[in-house]
Structure formats: structure tokens, C-alpha cells
Amino acid sequence: MLEDLFSATVLIGILASGIRLATPYLYAAIGETFGQRSGVLNLGVEGIMLMGAFSGFYTVFRTENLWLGLISAIIVGGLMGLATAYVSVTLQAEQGISGIGVFLFGLGMSDLLFQKLINNVVTIRGFPDLPIPILSKIPVLGEIFFNHNFLVYGAYLLAVLAWFIFNKTTIGLSIMAVGENPAAADTLGVSVTAVRYFTVTLGGVLSGVAGASLSIALLNVFQQNLTNGIGFIAVALVYFGGWRPLWVLAGSLLFSMVNSLQIWVQVIGLPIRSDVAVMLPYILTIVVLVLTAGRVRAPSALTKPYERSG
Amino acid sequence: MKKIFVLLSLLLAVAILTACGGTGAGGSGQEGPFRVAVVMPSAINDLAFSQSMYDALVKIQKEMGEENFEIAYSDNLFVVDDAASAIRDYASQGFDLIIAHGSQYGASLQEIAPDFPETSFAWGTAGDTMGLPNVFAYEALSQEGGYVNGVMAAALSQSNTIGVVGPIEVGDAKLYVDGFKAGAKATKPDIQVNVNYIGSFSDVALASEAAQTHAEAGADALTGTAQMVVGAIGVAEERGIPWFGTQANQTTLAPSVVVACQVYDWTVLLDQIIDLVKKGTYGGNAYAVTLENGGLLIEYNDGYNLPADVKALAEEAIKGIKDGSITVNVGQ
């Protein structure tokens, strides 16, 4: 039985499904990386994802236009990000607590709207798979990497883009400066408030897209609490990745691959109890977190509101 | 101060939103309508467990007339603590019958029911009343429909591989899955039934990925149980793989691939319970919906072109289970 696990079908299956599963985690975690790098912890990711998932789904349900759906998820996510920024940056609320508030708001509101506007579980036609010409024909690799829907590719491009922004641009430099030493950044003429509003709103936009990647691309359905904790895992993945986009990408992939591995372990019928199998990704996450603790320092100003002194 | 104010207003907003669940109703009295309250773990429109109960109550209401039968509900109470306080609230409001629709509510009921000896409670899915005089227990022998679905799935399968997406390996879900396996094996002894429990009743994304995985592993018939299977049904439809449903009729979700669904019709036992409560008996009995008593129904999707011989096999299985010539030996 164990040799079944190493057959080509299974290995390709694990990799391809891990890449799909990682998509919502990536959007949400990269978005959260921007916020945290500038010193703002947003625990409300899950709630924003739910609102993005619902608004995207509802728009497609009504108009059958996928792009409009994506845009509406972006707008709703952005607005919730903006609201989060107002609470965290302008009002300087305790970020852990207000984030939970944003989450509960999104959880309740998305369900309320769902009950009022649709009121039963329905399916829509979501973004279809988009095999990339030529590349998708490569044996094995083509199936694993180049046979997904557009939002899956987008998530990986986003991680690379985020790496580029942080390492090669002045915008990235300003964000990191604000997260490390806001007072110094301020004296150098970088507006702490503007940078934080930008990163938290961007985080909201990406959380909205993360939700939409579920409701209008991967699952094509909406249900109460559709995201089921993905947003919280995404926040953990930011720590896991040490606030560096490519490590966040690696963490998301690792988590998702182990998740798809445990699905396969059950499907092939390896004698492991299902409740043990489903724990694997979480156990692994904790182990890696423990092993890598202290490897990277968190942004110094994380969760600390900035008030100009003097 | 400002921060505290913001926090408080946020919490208030959340409280208002989450309180929008059910409909409360005041007043009580012996005359007037029969008042039922139900507390459920998922949404009333989940196309699964909770919806089956809500639909049954609405059906009874239609028969008895709205003026004679009042329904109040609280759904999405997956957190047992919240459910317990809802149950207690309904009891203090003087409802005639309070249905705790979830095995996980048993311990709460054990605490609450003795405090309201004049109120009747129903609890399911559960096999016994915990010795409480004002509690009825009810369950579904879902392995029966599982068996029938398994017979059809095995007969339809060309690849000799079938996939099952389950939530957590307990209770009603396990009964259905085990019954399904038994039916499939009885039809084709060498058939491969791959079972995957995803460890959650609500993780739609994982249910979807589990179905993808079954398909990659060669399954050409799929089934699953609990409210997160909507994710798996989506995959079945996209890939054109026949789907067998349970708990509610899921045909609307994927009209092209749903073959048949085992539907729970709780009215069969609710009618008896309501009758007893009206006559002053508040509990003590345990009920089950079965194929035999009409509480379990196999509903075929007319839009799916099911070969006549496969349907005949299913009907034969239903008949066998009803008359006892087939026993589905799981769970008990």
C-alpha cells in the first residue's frame, strides 16, 4: 500500500492539488504581510474574505459576469480594509481585539446578506481552468503547474511581485521603515499614516480576492462561513514565513501539500485513522514554527499605533 | 476612552448582527397554536441535516395551518454553549416542544430538561432519551439509504472505484458511509470504495479537494454526507461524475450528475411526538426514520438517465430492506 503513495498519479495529484489549495491562503497571507510589515496586525482577514467571497459570488450570480464579480470582491475587500485602517491607525484601537470585531462583522454580515439575498445554496459557473499554451503540454509538470484557473496563477505571481516590491522598490523600503521605526521614517518625510492606510487597504483588497478565489473560481458556491478559518491560518503563515513573501509562499505551499497528502493517504486507504490524518498539516505547522522560532524578528512596531511625539 | 467607545460600538454591532437568527415569540397559554422551537447546528437552507428538519416543520405547518402551528428557530448554532442558552430561552418562553437538532446538544439537554418538567424536548440524532421523562429521542437509519445508493453506485461504476467524502467519522455520517460501502460491496464484491473523512462539517474547500482527489484516483461515482459536500458536488458536476446525495434532495445543485438522494422526512415521527405532547405525554420514547416507515425516501433525479436495470436493483434493495430480507449490519 505504501508504494501506492509514490506512484506518478498520486504524486502529481498531491502537487497539483496542493497548488490549488494554497491559492486563498496566498492572497490573504501576502496581503497581511503588507499590513504587518508596516506595523499593523489585521486579525480580521477571515471576515474580509467572507465578505469578498459573498460579494463576488452574488455579483456573478446576478450578472453572470466573472470580472464584475472579481471587481466587486476587490471593492468590498478594499472598503473593509479601509475601515480596518481607520480603526487601527486613526482611532488607534487595540489591533488584536478590533480584528476579532472585523472578523465577527464579516461572518455575521456575509451570512445575513446570503440569507436575505439568495437564501439557498446554489452554484454558479466560475473561472474555468486556463491551460497555458505549450507549457501545459509538458508531461507531468504541465499538469501540476500550468492547468489551473486564472486566480491560481495570479496568487503565485502576486507572491513574486510582493518580493519585488519589498526588495527592489522605494515603496517597499518605506513600508518596512514605517514598520521598524515609524518615528525615524516620519522625520525622513514618510507619512506613517498614509503608508499604513495603503498597506491595510491593500491587505483588504487581497483578502477580498482570497475569498472570491473560493466562491467564484475554486468552489463556485457560497455557504455560511465558507472560508472556515483560512483567514486565520493565513495570519499564522505570515509569522511562519518571517514576514518575507517568498517564505510565506513556501509556508502556504507546505501547509497545502501536507493537506493534500493527508487526503491521498485516506483515499489510498493507508491504515491511518482519519482524525489523525487531518491533524497532519496543523502538527507540521506547529513543529516548523517551534523549530524556526527566533529565526526572524517581527517588525519592531508591529501592533503599536504611532503617535507623533512633541 | 475613545478606544473603548470604538470597541463597544463594534461589539454592539456584532451582537445585533448575530442576534438576527431566529424569530422569537412571546405569550403562551393552553389555547392557541402548538408552538415548536428548533435549535440547529447549521443553516436552515444547508441542503442537508438542518434543512431536513426545517422543511419537515414547514410541511406540518402547511397541513395544520399557520394559526394552529407556530415555528421558531435558531440556526447556525454550531457552538454548543450558544445552542444551550437558546434551548433554555425557548423553554422559558413556554414553547410546547423544543427540538434540539444535533447529537452534540445531548449534554446540554440533560441539564436543561429537568428544569422544565412541563415542556417537551426532542433530541436527535440519538438512540435514547437519557432516562429523562420529558425527552423524546429520534434518529435516522441513514445506513439504509446509504446501502441503496451504494448498490446503484457500484452498478454504474465502470472503473470499479467509488469515492466517498465524509465529515467526521461519527454518528449519522458514519452510518451512511458504512451502509453505502455495504451496498456497494454486496453488488460488486471486488469494488474499491475509497473513503475520505475531511475532519470538518463546514470545510467546503477541503471537501472539494477530496472529491478532486477521488476523481484523480479513478472514481467514477461519488457520494458524501453533511453540509460541506456542496464543494464536492461542484467537482462532480464539473467533471461529469454521477453523485449520490443524502439528508436532502441535492438535485438543484447539479442537475446533470445527481442520480438519487436519500431524503429524510422527519414528519413521520414528528406527527407522533406532537400528538403525544398534545395528550400530555412529554417524552420517554425513541423513534427512527426508516425506509419501512416512509421517513427515509430515495428520490431519483428525473433529469438523470439512470439505466432501468440499475434502478431495478435499487428498488429491489429498498424492498429487501423494508421486508427484512436484507439487513444492513452497520452501526448497531
Image: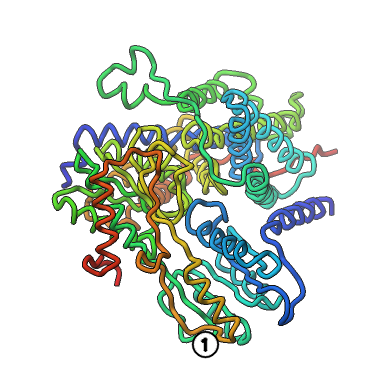
Looking at the image, residue A308 sits to the left or right of residue A16; the answer is right
In this view, B70 is above or below A137:
below
Residue A67, picture quadrant: top right
Residue A174, picture quadrant: top right
In this view, A161 is above or below B155:
above
Residue, disc 1: B133
Task: Return the x and y of residue A229 as percentages of the image width and height.
Answer: 52, 48
Looking at the image, residue B26 sits to the left or right of residue B134; the answer is right
Asked if residue B104 can be seen in this view, the reply is yes
Point out the image quarter for the C terminus of chain B.
bottom left
Asked if residue A178 can be seen in this view, the reply is no
Looking at the image, residue A201 sits to the left or right of residue B165; the answer is right
Query: Which residue is at the front of the view, B256 or B208?
Result: B256
Task: Return the x and y of residue A301 as percentages of the image width and height.
Answer: 66, 40
Q: Residue at x 45, y 73 (%)?
A: B138
Task: Return the x and y of residue A149 as percentages of the image width and height.
Answer: 44, 25
Looking at the image, residue B182 sits to the left or right of residue B265; the answer is left
Residue B308, picture quadrant: top left
Point out the image quarter for the N terminus of chain B.
bottom right
For numbered disc 1, what is the local secondary structure?
loop
Q: Residue at x 64, y 22 (%)?
A: A171
Mark 1: few/some/many CA within 10 Å (<14, 14-19, 20+): some
Task: Return the x and y of residue B310 as percentages of the image width and height.
Answer: 25, 46
